[in-house]
Every structure is written in C-alpha cells, then in structure tokens.
Image (cartoon, helix red, strand yellow):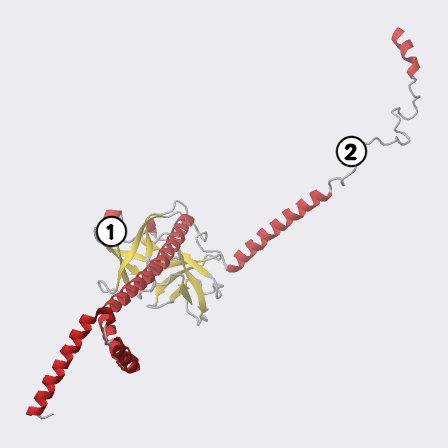
Amino acid sequence: MRDTRESRLLLVLLVSIAFALITLDIRGGENSPLDGPREAAASFFGPVEEGVAGAVDPVANAISAIRESGDRHDRVAELERENAELRQQLGSDEYRDSRTRQLDELLRTAGAGGYRIVGAQVIAIGAAQGFSWTVTIDAGTEDGITRDMTVLNGEGLVGRVTTVGRGQATVLLANDPEFSVGTRLEGSEELGLATGGGGNTFEVQLFNQQARVREGDRMVTFGSAENRPFVPGVPVGEVVNVNRSNGDLTRTVEVRPFVSFTQLDLVGVVVEPPRDNPRDSVLPPRPEEENQDEEREQGARNEDEESAGEGEETQGEPGDEVGEPQPPTEGETGAGEGEAPVDAGDDDTATEE
C-alpha cells in the first residue's frame, strides 16, 4: 500500500476501533458483547489453524530432534559402553577358562613325569640373539631358573632356556632349525635325533636303519647328561610320514609336534628332574585306549547291576513261611543205619545203672 493521506487516516481509524473493542471487551467481563463474534471467528479459523499446524509439525519435530540429539547421543554412547563391557566380560570368562584348562594340563603333565616346575607366562615372541623361533617368559634367576633347562607345557616339549635375566628368560622353541633333541620311540625304544623344521614338523633321524616305525607312533625325549638341557620322558610328537631307506645309515621320519608353537601362553620350566625315568607314562592315552577304558567301566557297571538284580530274585516270594518244618525222609529218623531206635522208656533203667 502506498503511503498516502488516505492510508494514514485508515490506519488511525482501525487502531481506534481496535482500542474501542478491547476497552468494551474488558469492561464487559464475562458478559462481553464480543463473545459471540469471538466464537464465530474460532469456528471459522480453527480448521485453518489445524492445517497450518500440520504443515509446520515436521519443522517442529526437526527442531525438537535437534534439541534432543545431545541426550540421544549420550544414550547411544552409554549403550555402546555397556556393550563393550559385556563383550570384555565374555572374553575374560573365555580367557579365564582357557587359562584354567592350560594350568590343569600343565600340572597333569608335570605330575605324571615327576617334574618339579616353575610356572611362567609367555610375554613376548620374536627373534632374539640370532634365533628365529624364540619366546620370552616372565620368570628368571629370581625364580630359580638357569640356562639349559627344559621348558614344557600341558601338551609336551616347548624348548629350552637359552638366556636368563632376573625376571625374564629367553626360550628357544623346539621347532627352530637350530634346535635338536634326542628322542626315543614309544614301545620299541628306538633312539633318534629330532631337528626343528621352522614350522609344524620335526625331522627325526632314527639311528637304526631297520627300525620298524609307522605313522601314528609317538616319541618322547631321551634325556641328557645330568638332565641338561633335557629331562627324559617329555612328549615330543607323533610320526606322520616315514621316508623309505635309500641305503643311508639312518632312517628319517617326519614328526608332528604335540605343541602348537603359535599359541603358547602358560609354560613350565623344569627346575628339578624326576627321580626315575618316566619312560612313556607322560604320553596321553590314545583315543582307542580311552574308548576301551570307557567300555570296561560300562561293563563293570552292567555286571554290578546284574548282580544286584540276581540278588533280589533269590529272595523269598512274599507270603512264604520261613522255618516251616518238613516231614523227615527215610533214613533221617536220628538213628544210624543198622541201629535200633532208642526207646524213651529205657531212660529210668539207664539212670539207675
């Protein structure tokens, strides 16, 4: 609208009318003469207001979402933290169970061989002092460990101690190419020399070219002079391949170690050798032997149950009379054969005599 004299007069008039209506409405109180027009205006403009509100709601919701985004972010962060704690707790439980199992197997192996050990944990792995397969353990001279001691775990031979500090020691693993240990074949007691292959196999040269060996045969350590660096009877591995003899003075076989060298955690250092050579007693039982033991135990339980059932069947039936006298058979009258029966009436005569 253009700013003219008429427009100004119209604006003054409208403002005056508005003030007059407000004054009249206020003075009227509850009986204001403007109640009717107000209700009519509300009826007319109500649907329009609802439509405008519906169109504006997304904007309002967006503004509300922006205002609440901080609270929601905090809630999401809290849920993520709780989820991480649950995952950590679950992982801790699995790790604790694994450590418990390893410790039980280690103690079983040490007990079966009569080895006195010092438990340790692998804290580092990698090359050390020119060796390609070594680990560092958290035990040293303070724990009674010295150089050239046998290291084992619940599965078998791990290696030998090469260097020792006050609280740490370096262990050369048995699969290192520079590692060698004397072995003895289970049962036949054939001797050999095992050398690490840098992986998951040993190469064992049997001293007897005609040694009878087949896949599945197992080996243990033969032992060293004064039990340094190896004590006898520690499980080494299982034969997986037998090479044909080509006229060599020795016979070569491939052996898979019992120990997984990439999953080492708890180990034991033998600080005191066994009094007697444990021979093959440290080797775990074969699966077929375990099945046979289970079958024998099951058979013994079945025999016990059958014995208990037969004992119940031999008992008298309900209602049988116990101790009922039976009529004597011929020859069971109390007198011997050819003897006259005793007359009860002769008692007086015998007494008088």
Residue 322's label in the rendered image is 2
Q: How many numbered callouts?
A: 2
Residue at 79%, 31% (x, y): give it. Answer: 323
Q: Are marks 2 and 1 in contact (CB under 8 Å)?
A: no
Q: Which of 175 and 222 is in front in this view?
A: 175
Q: Which of 65 and 291 is in front in this view?
A: 65
Q: Nearer the viewer, residue 147 or 183?
A: 147
Judge left or right: residue 6 versus residue 272.
left
Q: In this view, does 343 lie above or below 291?
A: above
The amino acid pointed to by label 2 is Val
Q: Is residue 348 above or below residue 179?
A: above
Residue at 89%, 32% (x, y): give it. Answer: 329
Classify residue 192 by image quadrant. bottom left
The amino acid pointed to by label 1 is Gly
Residue tagged 1: 140
Judge left or right: residue 12 versus residue 47.
left
Q: In the rendered image, is residue 109 in sight?
A: yes
Q: In this view, does 309 lie above or below 102?
A: above
Q: Residue 92: give x, y in percent of width and height.
A: 33, 58
Residue at 13%, 84% (x, y): give it. Answer: 14
